[in-house]
Amino acid sequence: MQIKPASECHWDLISLGEVMLRFDPGDKRIATARSFEVYEGGGEYNVARGLKRCFGMRTAIVTAITDNPIGCLLEDLISQGGVDQSLIQWVEFDGVGRSARNGLNFTERGFGVRPAVGCYDRGHTAVSQLKPGDVDWDEIFGKRGARWFHTGGIFCGLSASTPEVALEAMKAAKRSGSVVSYDLNYRDSLWRSAGGKKRAEEVNRRLAPFVDVIFGDFSALGFEMPDQARALEESIGAMVSQFRFKVVATTLRKAKTATRQDCGAICYSEGKFHQAPQRTDLEVFDCVGAGDAFASGLIYGYLSGRDPQSSVELGAADCAITDE
Amino acid sequence: MQIKPASECHWDLISLGEVMLRFDPGDKRIATARSFEVYEGGGEYNVARGLKRCFGMRTAIVTAITDNPIGCLLEDLISQGGVDQSLIQWVEFDGVGRSARNGLNFTERGFGVRPAVGCYDRGHTAVSQLKPGDVDWDEIFGKRGARWFHTGGIFCGLSASTPEVALEAMKAAKRSGSVVSYDLNYRDSLWRSAGGKKRAEEVNRRLAPFVDVIFGDFSALGFEMPDQARALEESIGAMVSQFRFKVVATTLRKAKTATRQDCGAICYSEGKFHQAPQRTDLEVFDCVGAGDAFASGLIYGYLSGRDPQSSVELGAADCAITDE
Amino acid sequence: MQIKPASECHWDLISLGEVMLRFDPGDKRIATARSFEVYEGGGEYNVARGLKRCFGMRTAIVTAITDNPIGCLLEDLISQGGVDQSLIQWVEFDGVGRSARNGLNFTERGFGVRPAVGCYDRGHTAVSQLKPGDVDWDEIFGKRGARWFHTGGIFCGLSASTPEVALEAMKAAKRSGSVVSYDLNYRDSLWRSAGGKKRAEEVNRRLAPFVDVIFGDFSALGFEMPDQARALEESIGAMVSQFRFKVVATTLRKAKTATRQDCGAICYSEGKFHQAPQRTDLEVFDCVGAGDAFASGLIYGYLSGRDPQSSVELGAADCAITDE
Amino acid sequence: MQIKPASECHWDLISLGEVMLRFDPGDKRIATARSFEVYEGGGEYNVARGLKRCFGMRTAIVTAITDNPIGCLLEDLISQGGVDQSLIQWVEFDGVGRSARNGLNFTERGFGVRPAVGCYDRGHTAVSQLKPGDVDWDEIFGKRGARWFHTGGIFCGLSASTPEVALEAMKAAKRSGSVVSYDLNYRDSLWRSAGGKKRAEEVNRRLAPFVDVIFGDFSALGFEMPDQARALEESIGAMVSQFRFKVVATTLRKAKTATRQDCGAICYSEGKFHQAPQRTDLEVFDCVGAGDAFASGLIYGYLSGRDPQSSVELGAADCAITDE
Amino acid sequence: MQIKPASECHWDLISLGEVMLRFDPGDKRIATARSFEVYEGGGEYNVARGLKRCFGMRTAIVTAITDNPIGCLLEDLISQGGVDQSLIQWVEFDGVGRSARNGLNFTERGFGVRPAVGCYDRGHTAVSQLKPGDVDWDEIFGKRGARWFHTGGIFCGLSASTPEVALEAMKAAKRSGSVVSYDLNYRDSLWRSAGGKKRAEEVNRRLAPFVDVIFGDFSALGFEMPDQARALEESIGAMVSQFRFKVVATTLRKAKTATRQDCGAICYSEGKFHQAPQRTDLEVFDCVGAGDAFASGLIYGYLSGRDPQSSVELGAADCAITDE
Amino acid sequence: MQIKPASECHWDLISLGEVMLRFDPGDKRIATARSFEVYEGGGEYNVARGLKRCFGMRTAIVTAITDNPIGCLLEDLISQGGVDQSLIQWVEFDGVGRSARNGLNFTERGFGVRPAVGCYDRGHTAVSQLKPGDVDWDEIFGKRGARWFHTGGIFCGLSASTPEVALEAMKAAKRSGSVVSYDLNYRDSLWRSAGGKKRAEEVNRRLAPFVDVIFGDFSALGFEMPDQARALEESIGAMVSQFRFKVVATTLRKAKTATRQDCGAICYSEGKFHQAPQRTDLEVFDCVGAGDAFASGLIYGYLSGRDPQSSVELGAADCAITDE
């Protein structure tokens, strides 16, 4: 897989996706909490943030934020995260949040037999209203340059127009020689009232031909996601033969309880399979974003010139640590 | 003004309005905070809560809440507030917040020359989608009985249908002999994209004929709101002659800084004016809800059989303490 | 076991017991803490609260609270818990706490090999001074109606008069056709200076003939509490033959460390034994109230018309989650 | 006034009084708080602590503490305060708090027009059960030596036996040549059910002949406490002629609001009056213990050989700063 | 005063100075606190941060940071502040802090009559070891370009070599046509063991000829700093005639108490004096950095093409709000 | 081993070492934290504190503290810890921390596969500048008396002069008949730029002849530290034959993850080996100071007249609980 040299590009990676405020009640439960800590997060954004914070890569986020104090808090958090914000589209606030708002995500951690719980509040966001033509992709990929472009199934589930934006971006990225990666992340809540998994699959299949590196939940592309390595390799083989992916990678996680998990990873690359060592009985503090950490570690492997085996190991380690 | 005896009514007061989560960054500013305390609040609701918590009245809230963990947190907070929740309409959650969500309100306190700042996130809420016919007002006022009904200009600014709901409720309340009060609270952010103050005025004027006790910002009804007592009395006279209000009451607050205010109140009742003692240089910890506290204290005065002078003094004292 | 239909009763369950403020130093230890979070709790109350919060049942607490700011905090916490407070007896405060006070409970969680530690401060409480005649049980059970009455060995250990109150309540409950349950909870600290376990056993045996459903530590009734299922069934058999209990239920918990436990449960009902699946190596965040959660889940099973097997499983699951 | 040299005494000052846990809800109110910070405090103890922390004096507290985790927390807090604990009597805990407990004090700060609120929970404490003979005063004052002994009207209001303990201590102190001071602090809550102010006055008058330095609220000794300096001096004159006090000192505080106060002080010494400069419009963060700080500063003045004018100024400054 | 256009420069402003961790005990005092909030701060840095956060300017900080977790926390905080970190020099950590460490600053706020207290822990820092030649100033000012260069008396008090670094930078800045500003900030603690105010004055006088815009405490340059406007203007006149400053600006603040201040400002520019409106009785939350905020506002005035009167008003307003 | 009776000594144990502020970001990581809790700590000090807090021994610390608010916070924390501070040397502060400062230690806990991280900031501390002659050891050991003297390899790694101070103290202790113990604690960070482990070994070997009881990492004395009991006993045998130690004791800990450890201990005494029971899979909250707790427990065993087997078990239990 050909990756453009760092010296020719302004950015190492561009991510396209939503950045939400994450409200975390700590040890408490959402419904009885009286205070929340607040972070920023979002599947595609987390990859850009991880590459910057853990690995020092130059990353930027393409998204839209409604211009109010909540948006300014997002800006403050992204600043702390170190991700370049110059490509963010700021959308006028109507004073109430009818025309455009910012996405929120309330999550609690779970403990032992009690599972983690999340509650999205991300309808009518500015980013869900992005449409083709809003972003000057040729300026980004053609003129300034980026070595890698990443987006995924969460962004594409935000509305009917977001897959069109992703498609437009992928085409521009490919034209410029950037690697394109896509995380198949499927969120039932996003698609429930918009065609369900069937529709998600259609959207993903329409984008897949433009993807070099694919992550995640293969079932969202209409393939099996079996537990056993053998069958998994077959499934990946089928995907590759149909879509010509250069790299296919996924974690193999099994949550025994909310606080104890097994974690491994597999990566297909140019006809070969590579596996990260399986970690068992990992003590888990907070499992949110572990899949994004995996993508972030693996992409860094490739961006830094490592081979596929090293890259998948880096991804799996990053996933286990769920570092910053 | 005739008030039904407590023994004939299941509730002392019914409020109609939105209950939002209020996110409070404490000493910090919204845009740089990392944690928020959370309360419940809402102009009309605050009156019901104050009557329950400070004065032990039996109050209920009519509103709609989207059924997700955020809604459950609202339920938990309202439980703590002691307001009867049996009339709340629970609306199905779509997993994202596109069809219906719960209102949020980010507020910071201000200090000295820095004013308090608020940021609504209350578009597309369940309560804004309430429409005539959703609530069985005759069951509430006719069968079970309430001595007083309260709503206001914030609820009526939520959408095009909410004034219709208010109208329907007022008519049922009057039919049953309940006192009807209305707080003219004008929020520019709510009306900015919906016809502005002119439209608010039209809505308020359409409801005014059904109102017995009117609170607040007379300009939202198309009357002057002068600083001087003399001129204010004239303005009230004009209102009364046009709309036949039995009671007209408003606070006279002047914020010297975010932390120092003067606070007084005036109450017109059956041809006479009553003034609460003017308090100067009040140290202010948090001015949110002071107007609602005034309404709450004054209504309690009437519900407990006090005369207008005592009632306006009670309201003004409650406003100064901003209890709870 | 016959349970009155919900439509004929104002409440699903009435609990009789103390509600204490629980002071929790979080990760810290009591003796070196500088701040405490505060909750409300109490063995019998927890059952009423769990039935309301987890299962939506209409429950009330019968207790006495001293009328001071600490009592008002209890009221605020019980409001949040959703349990009906209209039957609470408010006792005048003397300004110091000589004549009557409110119970406090300082608890720390333990971690690993360090056990949880508790420190009661519940002498001279208002509730410990309750005596026969203070509560109008016929109004509660006879006129308004309750499907179930619950109390237990903690309430009966508060003073010499509390077992008399429990007896009076049980008799009224049975007269009205309510199910009567009793949790044998034995607290050495309560009985140490009041006759010890021998006296607790006498008290429990005096009440047992009025009990339909008995929970807990059989040794407090003078029976064996063996580890093995076989022997346990024999012990239960002996209890049933002596006291004619309709249901006998207990958890089988084994704390390997403060943070790791095994948890199962057994329920005898009409001649048959039912076991909940044994959960091993549960990660424990806070074990306080797990037994109460079991009672709460099992009672809900019966109140909602489930069979004994489902009910004990519900109880055991609730115990494992220790919800809220 | 003769003061023994430091080199001849093991301690500079011995205080006799209760040490309570103070629970502080911060910006919140007691009745709606969910967490409390905890400090130690008590009128007589505060003087010993202030002398140690602000002025480096060697001070000890004579009190009784019930031996449970709450008592250990008191010990930890007193350790931090630096006051010698070797004279504390540890009383056995019965597991519940029926026979002896530790005193608690819930206080909220007040703000602006809302006054500070306190709620004692100090009935049945170990210290209230101290009786003559429990403490070996001759060992303390006769053998080891202390330059100054301090107690006051709060300790003497705890029970019928505490004034007897104070008397016994004062006599031993005087025998050894120690200066004896007494703060007339009158707490209505302590005396309400024990004879009221009239009884407090009797108790204070019985102790007064053994007092060298008297602080505080003269009305608790049956004298006027007028606002004007002239009349105040007359009142002091009457006190001195009756009781032969060597020093009479009191603050002149006027709380305009909970957050704004005026603060001055007057000190009579050997026929002359000394006044500290009047401070107006002091911003007040927390007024608890300001009177104790005054006593502490003034006593330090005398212990360090300063003249009465310097001493009262030191006391007034300490009161204004309410250090630590 | 000539300012280069934004389009010709990579940065609007470069600041040279130390960035410390600021440890803040909140409402508590340093000596008895058990937790601290942490911010970043530093006189020269604050100007760059304010210009970025309040006014959106592109600013960078030139400093040195020791490469350990404390340094990484500084990096995280500066990221949040939005100031460009690409010019920071990272210095190797020896594991202990003997050869180089990072500066810390413990500060408490003061309240009413209690003054704010600070405690530096900034000896042996990496930045104090900066020396001429360490920074490539020609690359910064000559090649990439900056419209404005700012440093001050705190940086120049760090060691014997830092004034040399400032001089080197000023010369490069002037060569490139950048405006040079200098804040005379005098910190007694920095100079106490290094020649005192006399030495500070010598250092400042040596740098003054290269300064266009001078802020602050004129006494650190050997001139009078009188209270009265008239005399102040004379003093400024003397400074200008000696050093040819283009702009001389200073705040006129008077702290009545730690929580109440008067605040005004004066600005000399090209032969004329401009005064900001005097604000009296400002309620002060935290006065740290108010002088830096003034510089930041005034510089923004000039950078955005405003006239001197607008610029000084902007500075004074920024100072009053002490934003962020 | 002969230990002086308690009645002949003013102290049970004197420790010589540094006391640092420990900054703890709780659940967070240092580099992204915004607040820190603060404790006091230090290898040698922890032993004195543990003996006081867990076992009631009279202990004192010999150290030096720079006299500024940070030092006062240390004083406040040590007061809370109960360790006698009368032997602390207070060193003048220069206002900046160039000549002398106080040591800081930033630590984060680790979780699961993420290891605990620490960052020292302890260069140029007052205590590292202690030199022979600064402390009057004959006054301490000869006149007032101490039963036990403890120091260790951390103190001796602070500078070139600290081993000389330790030597001076050990000699005085031995002259007076005190037991001397030494913990071989090796910190790479301290020695990295001062001769490394080789130099540490030389220092330790020079002190070893004066040591009665040796703890810790034998490799810092040039001996093997094998995993297996058999080989370990041989290594201890070699140490004893060379240095004539009376007691050699060490924990045998193995961290499986940051949150799960095995923990055992071995103690050689007068020709015999004693082992504490091996605890496996201990859940670990915070492993800092576990070795010091071991020393503290074992020393208490000897001071209270227990035999070696009981003493090593006490040490191991204390280590497992890591109490206070």
Image (tube, coloured by chain):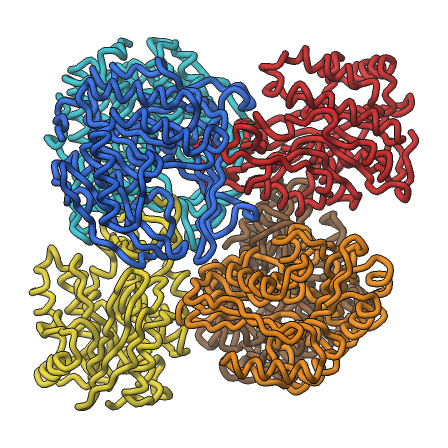
Chain colours: A yellow, B cyan, C blue, D red, E brown, F orange
| Image quadrant where residue A162 sits | bottom left
Image quadrant occupied by the C terminus of chain A: bottom left
Image spot of residue A196 (x, y percent): 9, 60
Residue closer to the observer: E140 or B182: B182
- Give how far across and how far down residue B134 sits, in percent: 12, 32
Q: Nearer the viewer, residue F103 or B96?
A: F103
Is F214 positioned to the left or the right of D275 in the image?
left
Question: Does residue F252 appear in the picture of this structure?
Answer: yes
Specify whether D207 is left or right of C80: right
Residue name at image x 30 percent, y 85 percent: A302
Taking B94 as reference, is D300 left or right? right
Q: Identify whether B56 is placed above or below A304.
A: above
Looking at the image, how many numbered discs can be counted on the residues?
0
Q: Is residue C285 left or right of residue E115?
A: left
| Residue in the foreground of this view, choosing between E215 and F69 | F69
Specify whether residue E237 is in view: no
The spot of residue F31 in percent (x, y) is 49, 67
Compared to B230, does A94 lie above or below?
Answer: below
Q: Residue at x 25, y 14 (%)?
A: C139
